[in-house]
């Protein structure tokens, strides 16, 4: 193969000094890189066990979960613990292995969803039954502390107008709908045990299709529902949008969805003293609190840090 | 490596070839989305590029803007547009068009610039009008570089169009997100393999096209590679 | 816009995360692309293999690569190392081609003169071909820098903190100002690194300063040569 060859009239005269400079910079870059490769930025998050006197608090990639994690962190710090925050880790499938490996010590979780992740064939039942089942399903290195009254669970949600039009109250009443029922939500919804397939198998409800909206029941999902681009979606029950956008979470008498109470999932490094701090939070946290915390984040655009601090002060805990 | 074996098994599982989520459907959607995005970007970038290349005006501005365009993160633009217009195809088309403009623009104006001034002077000397020079000299001679830009843009769209499934029921990205969120690695890898195959297919087509558009009599030149536009734009 | 003013710390922290994710791949891809590009330029056999290899690499969509790579290299999915390796691969994919073309654009007469005065192949590479290809390499590296910064945002989808986190968070909470801030910060960081490379180029290749267009036009002239 013959390469095109430049026949420019101008020629460059490279000088030794410049070459030396190039070499120095190249070597410098290599050294900087080597330093970088062994330095801290790359070490963190690679599943290493946390330092002995520090508790690593993690959170899901979900703004509401981050607020709870921030509440845990500030409470632990107020009680003399050193906290390392690794928030927004992602979804359960990503962070659960890290927790089991001891890379994270405290994580706000939801009883039903965690149970279903650990035990796909879990039976479910009341909120207490799920909590008991969850304790049995956890690996030996992990445990859950007391669950809070606050719950933030999945729900089949429609607009109020749509509910009135077809007289919808519970999930089974979706059978009344005579128009095509387009479902939207994160792509997990499509395959979850309570997803469209379950609606058909359990209630004979036909859906018209599935549109992925990867914001976890956030504003885009709500907009799609309100714009009637989709008719049915999964919104977390603690979402402030249910009230502000006039949505209806259909009631679930058959426990298609598992109760999802907020619960701290902790490693063996969490001592009784730390556990009692977290249990005090669980005792105080209600679903109304959760909705208003979420609203402060979504509507008032406050940071998780500020929201958590204000809640702790109001609850007068520490 | 058994993940790859699973992915291949997923690719050959006949049950994945039926229904609205059939592999065949998704491939066609992805291809259609890619080509239409390419058309949108071309409609904006090619005339602009030709204008800049022909007149030499606005070049500095174009280079700077295109450089900034290149650094606009597609995910950010996609989510931003989606928040205003809602779910569906508008946001993905807008975000991916922005992604595709810089390479096409670069291909278009460098194609004009790369033409030897002597060639144009010669065309003028034999009595060609300005219009004739554009049509008969500049356009044909600039085609190989323009084609390089289109090729580069296509490659980027195909790979990035997977993000469209973030807000719309379209394309091979559906397999990636479903696979990712459900930890179904066979599906995710299988979807990725399809994206790569599609990219290679389009690469092959462009290689042939690039050879075809080199005007007769100039055929001694190598087909201009896709990176030419890149390196020039970065100046 | 109130969001931006009350979250400047957050934006700054994510910017630093982003620098940690994107600067090492830019440097690494340059260091790796020089020998690979040389191989692609020097031997016909390796040229075919390397150039089709990097072409293939560039066609791999980023999101699955971020997820598949940990299985191959043994990091966790959201480890910065994972992203750095993935972004380096993309950088190499872009840069190898540029290096090969840059070296090929060096005037044959210059090369022959170097051989005539007794330069070994090694010396000739470092003293003649590499510096003369410099402007082309710099142009390629600038593209790598800008694309790497932009691409690193996708890591947020898999839980790696970066400026992309402003997109996923803003998307979830419906805060447009946060997404806009993320886009502006990403573009700003990309342009800042780009500017730094231009300065570095002026420092290392002062001969291009007197006639900036000539040096950078080298590849174009080769194209012109090829077409005309």
Image: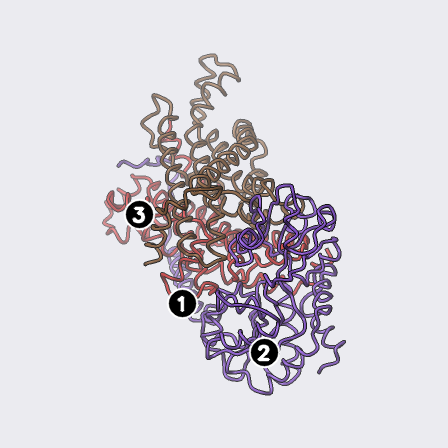
Chain colours: A purple, B brown, C red
Mark in front: 2 vs 1: 2
Dot 1: element: helix
Whether residue C214 appears in this view of the structure is: no
Question: What percent of the width, then of the height, locates residue C79?
Answer: 46, 65
Q: Name the residue under label 2.
A: A83
- Whether C90 is drawn above or below B129: the answer is below
Pick whichever of labels 2 and 1 is earlier in the sequence.
Answer: 1
Q: What residue appears at the point 60 percent right and 40 percent down from the top-left corner?
A: B90
Q: Residue C211 in the image: state x and y as whole percent.
A: 48, 42
Dot 1 alpha-carbon crowd within 10 angstroms: few under 14, some 14 to 19, many 20 or more: few
- The answer to which of B188 and A162 lies nearer the viewer is A162
The answer to whether B75 is drawn above or below residue B203 in the figure is below
Mark 2 residue element: strand
Estimate the spatial distance between the alpha carbons at disc 2 and disc 1, rounded to whole Å: 29 Å
Chain identifier of the residue bearing label 2 in the image: A
Gap in angstroms between the C-alphas marked 3 and 1: 26 Å
Q: Which mark is residue C50?
A: 3
Is label 3 in contact with label 1 (beta carbons under 8 Å)? no
Crowd rating for badge 3 (residues with CA inside 10 Å; few <14, some 14–19, many 20+): some
Report how far apart the C-alphas of labels 2 and 3 lie in the structure: 48 Å
Residue with the most extreme top position: B127
Residue A169 vs residue A298, the one in the foreground: A169
Where is residue C198 drawn, in percent x and y? 50, 50
The chain containing the residue under callout 1 comes to A
Residue neighbourhood size for the residue with mark 2, other residues' Cα within 10 Å, grouped as few (<14), some (14–19), many (≥20):
some
Q: Which corner quadrant holds the N terminus of chain A?
A: top left
Which of the image's four quarters has the C terminus of chain A? bottom right
Query: Relative to residue C75, is residue B29 depicted above or below?
Result: above
Front-lying residue, A226 or B217: A226
């Amino acid at each position: 193969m013959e390469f095109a060859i430049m026949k420019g009239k101008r020629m460059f005269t490279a000088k030794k000094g410049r070459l030396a400079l190039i070499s120095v910079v190249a070597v410098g870059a290599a050294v900087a890189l080597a330093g970088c490769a062994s330095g801290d930025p790359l070490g963190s998050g690679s599943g290493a066990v946390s330092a002995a006197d520090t508790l690593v608090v993690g959170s899901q990639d979900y703004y509401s979960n981050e607020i709870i994690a921030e509440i845990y962190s500030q409470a632990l710090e107020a009680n003399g613990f050193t906290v390392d925050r690794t928030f927004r880790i992602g979804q359960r499938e990503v962070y659960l292995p890290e927790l089991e490996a001891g890379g994270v010590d405290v994580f706000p979780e939801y009883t039903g969803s965690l149970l279903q992740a650990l035990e796909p064939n879990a039976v479910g039942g009341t909120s207490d039954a799920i909590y008991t089942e969850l304790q049995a399903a956890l690996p030996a290195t992990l445990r859950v502390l007391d669950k809070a009254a606050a719950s933030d669970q999945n729900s089949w949600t429609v607009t109020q107008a749509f509910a009135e039009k077809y007289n919808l109250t519970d999930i089974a009443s979706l059978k009344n709908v005579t128009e095509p029922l387009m479902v939207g939500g994160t792509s997990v919804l499509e395959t979850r045990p309570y997803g469209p397939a379950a609606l058909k198998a359990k209630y004979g409800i036909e859906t018209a299709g599935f549109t992925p909206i990867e914001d976890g029941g956030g504003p885009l999902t709500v907009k799609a529902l309100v714009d009637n681009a989709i008719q049915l979606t999964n919104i977390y029950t603690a979402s402030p949008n249910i009230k502000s956008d006039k949505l209806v979470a259909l009631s679930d008498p058959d426990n298609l969805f598992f109760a999802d109470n907020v619960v701290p999932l902790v490693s063996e490094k969490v001592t009784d003293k730390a556990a009692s701090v977290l249990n005090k939070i669980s005792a105080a946290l209600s679903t109304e609190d959760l909705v208003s915390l979420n609203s402060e984040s979504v509507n008032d655009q406050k940071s998780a840090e500020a929201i958590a601090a204000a809640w702790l002060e109001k609850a007068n805990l520490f | 490596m058994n993940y790859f074996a699973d992915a291949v098994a997923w690719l050959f599982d006949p049950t994945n070839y039926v229904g609205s989520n059939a592999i065949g459907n998704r491939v066609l959607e992805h291809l259609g989305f890619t080509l239409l995005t390419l058309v949108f970007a071309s409609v904006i970038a090619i005339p602009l590029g030709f204008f800049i290349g022909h007149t030499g005006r606005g070049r500095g501005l174009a280079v700077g803007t295109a450089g900034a365009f290149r650094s606009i993160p597609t995910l950010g633009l996609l989510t931003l547009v989606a928040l205003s217009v809602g779910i569906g195809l508008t946001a993905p088309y807008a975000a991916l068009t922005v992604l595709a403009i810089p390479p096409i623009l670069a291909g278009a104006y460098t194609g004009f610039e790369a033409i030897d001034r002597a060639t144009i002077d010669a065309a003028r000397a034999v009595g060609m009008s300005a219009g004739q020079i554009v049509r008969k000299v500049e356009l044909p001679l600039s085609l190989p570089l323009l084609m390089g830009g289109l090729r580069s843009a296509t490659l980027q769209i195909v790979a990035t169009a997977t993000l469209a499934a973030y807000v719309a029921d379209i394309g091979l990205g559906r397999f990636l997100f479903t696979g990712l969120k459900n930890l179904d690695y066979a599906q995710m890898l299988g979807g990725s393999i399809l994206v790569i195959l599609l990219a290679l297919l389009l690469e092959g087509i462009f290689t042939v096209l690039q050879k075809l558009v080199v005007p007769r009599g100039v055929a001694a030149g190598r087909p201009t590679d896709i990176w030419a536009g890149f390196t020039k734009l970065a100046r | 816009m109130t969001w931006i003013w009350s979250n400047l710390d957050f934006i700054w922290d994510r910017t630093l995360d982003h620098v940690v994710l994107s600067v090492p791949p830019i440097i690494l891809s340059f260091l790796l692309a020089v020998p690979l590009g040389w191989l692609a330029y020097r031997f016909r056999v390796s040229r075919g293999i390397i150039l089709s290899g990097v072409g293939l690499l560039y066609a791999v969509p980023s999101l699955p690569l971020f997820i598949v790579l940990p299985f191959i290299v043994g990091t966790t999915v959201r480890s910065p190392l994972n992203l750095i390796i993935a972004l380096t691969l993309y950088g190499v994919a872009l840069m190898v081609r540029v290096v090969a073309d840059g070296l090929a654009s060096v005037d044959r007469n210059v090369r022959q003169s170097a051989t005539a005065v007794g330069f070994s192949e090694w010396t000739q590479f470092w003293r003649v071909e590499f510096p003369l290809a410099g402007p082309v390499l710099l142009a390629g590296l600038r593209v790598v820098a800008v694309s790497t910064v932009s691409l690193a945002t996708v890591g947020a989808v898999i839980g790696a903190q970066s400026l992309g986190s402003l997109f996923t968070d803003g998307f979830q909470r419906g805060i447009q100002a946060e997404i806009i801030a993320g886009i502006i910060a990403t573009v700003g960081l990309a342009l800042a690194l780009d500017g730094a490379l231009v300065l570095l180029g002026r420092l290392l290749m002062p001969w291009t300063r007197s006639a900036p267009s000539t040096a950078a036009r080298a590849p174009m002239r080769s194209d012109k040569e090829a077409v005309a």
